[in-house]
Amino acid sequence: MTRDAYNQIEQVLERLMASSDPSVSLSVLASDLGFSEGYFQRLFTEWAGVSPKKFQ
């Protein structure tokens, strides 16, 4: 994994923690980064240790 990937996931984690919407969809999060849903989910899970849904 690259430093860029870490920075992107860090931004998503911060967004999820600050969000008043507890159910931001996987497709929205992936799209915001320009990733497919599958790739984003794998990347997020690798860095965070849980899926985006479980993190939320």
Image (spheres, rainbow, N blue to C red):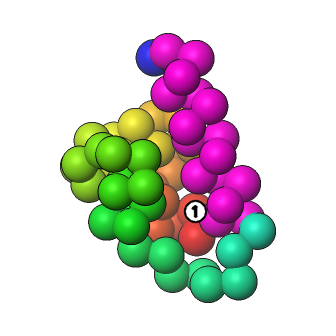
* Left or right, residue 11 beside residue 36: right
Helix, strand or loop for the magenta stretch, by majority:
helix
Within the image, what quadrant is residue 21 found in? bottom right
* Left or right, residue 38 beside residue 30: left
Q: In this picture, which residue range is highlighted in magenta? A: 2-17
Q: Residue at x 42, y 46 (%)?
A: 33
Given residues 14 and 44, the one toward you in this image is: 14
Picture coordinates of residue 4 (x, y %)? 54, 23
Picture coordinates of residue 6 (x, y %)? 58, 28
Q: Residues within 10 Å of mark 1 (few under 14, many from 20)?
A: some
Picture coordinates of residue 26 (x, y %)? 37, 65
Q: Is residue 27 above or below residue 41?
A: below
Q: Residue 13 magenta-drawn?
A: yes
Q: Is residue 56 above or below residue 42?
A: below
Which residue is identified by label 1?
55
Q: Residue 10 magenta-drawn?
A: yes
Q: Residue at x 60, y 82 (%)?
A: 22
